[in-house]
Amino acid sequence: MNTLHEPARDLPVIHEADVCVLGGSCTGLFAAIRAARLGARVVIVEKDNCFGGVATTAMVNVWHSLHDTEGKQQIIAGLTQETIDRLDRRGTVKRHELTNPSRGFTFNSEELKIELDELAREAGIKIYLHTQFAAPAPLRDASGRLEAVFVENKSGRGAIRARMFIDATGDADLAARLGCETYLANHLQPATACARFAGWSTLGETAARVGELIREHGPAHQLPPTFSWGNYVPNSDVYMLAATRIHGINPANADDLTHGEIEGRRQVRAIMDILRAASPDARLSLEALPSRLGLRESRHIRSSYQLSGDDVLSGRAFDDTIAQGSYRVDIHHQDKPGITLRYLDGLEEYHRPGHPSERSRWRPETATNPTYYQIPYRTLLPVSGPDNVIVAGRMLDVDPIAHAAVRVMVNMNQTGEAAGVAAVMALDTNQPLRALNVPALRAKLAAGGSAL
């Protein structure tokens, strides 16, 4: 393999902070806000032009219920609830039934971008958009702690020095480049490119037959079997459709990611052609494409505890719980069409486009069922690497079944809040993240609005 030598050079320190967050999804931003609200000097680095991640740049305009499966207890609050309330005051969010398993809230992704800007500004966070994390700086010899990270943007390459680092990159980029142990699941859930269409209502009955039409006409367009769903953008005739399926890519691989982005757009156009052929009089137009794929999974860190599917489906309680959820297990298959859904009450459903749903049970009926599950703090802490680095988001340590449930945004948002609070507590107490008093961490999360 040919190589070139990059000469060593001194880089300017462009910013110094108490806490540096890499990744500006809602998970990363919520980590930054919680840390800033506790008095820390916080800097956040985001490679795109806005905050929000999947909810904005990938255009997935749905958050799931903040309540347990029976709608009796609110199990998620914090900055997710605060953001929903702020959007509600602008009339840009629709609330669904508390027990709706598919959606709790639908919102305008463009309005969310602006609201997240406001939240960051109010918190006094130093923001670097259009800025790519490049590499960690060498570790300090004496302490073994990470001192700085290298980033690059239009102004060039520079270093950000901080005392605590939160990896919210989605792909565990910081952890992996630090040499922390990471792994890929045997079954990486496929990616989806969403799209927004204007004039969706003019499709008439065709709008309800998207999955069936793709199953029937997809082979002629080289479309894989898929599962389709979508939502109207509140107060509009614009519809967000998620009906593409990009198989066999690892989002942490540059070639795979490039292929996935181009293939996703190709599939959107093919679906649009199928819909127009089925309803030639419809006034359907492509209104927007995502600036990045909707990615479900790539690297995971190895922690001292891997959350299992059994933990989730049995509703196991943990002493170090920092997040809770009720979203069902949602397995998007690589090896066959459609998705499998498993519910906490023991029900299982297999959905294929154009076919009746197949219902069964993953366990026999019981007198009582769990109504939510929990995520422990320790799943955010790499077993190896510096003791001032914590992750937040979908790269936490989970098995494939657990990941299929906990990966959704309302759950991962909470891991961001926990990471932000933990980082400040570690600074205030001069302790490693792994040695924190977890009851005190939970108490501080609750005091800041989390529902624990």
Image: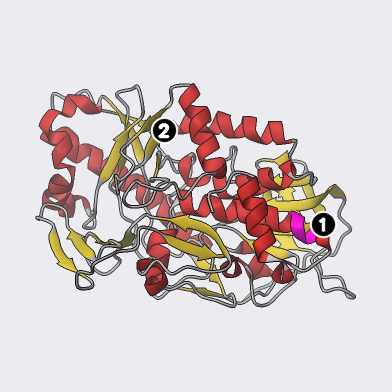
Above-or-below relation of 14 to 330: above
Visible residue check, residue 133: no
Q: Residues within 10 Å of mark 1 (few under 14, many from 20)?
A: few
Q: Residue at x 59, y 75 (%)?
A: 303
Of 40 and 67, nearer the camera is 67
Q: Residue at x 63, y 33 (%)?
A: 119
Residue denoted by label 1: 428
> In this rendering, would 276 be left or right of 49?
left
In the drawing, what numbered circle is on residue 107?
2
Q: Residue at x 67, y 52 (%)?
A: 444
Under mark 2, the amino acid is Phe
Q: Quadrant of the C terminus?
A: bottom right
The spot of residue 104 in percent (x, y) is 36, 41
Question: Sequence order check: which comes first, mark 1 or mark 2?
Answer: 2
Where residue 327 sits, quadrant-wise, is bottom left
Residues in magenta?
424-428
Q: Regarding mark 1 in the picture, which secondary structure is present there? A: helix
Labels 1, 2: front one: 1
Of 416 and 73, nearer the camera is 73
Of 416 and 7, nearer the camera is 416
The secondary structure that most of the magenta stretch takes on is helix
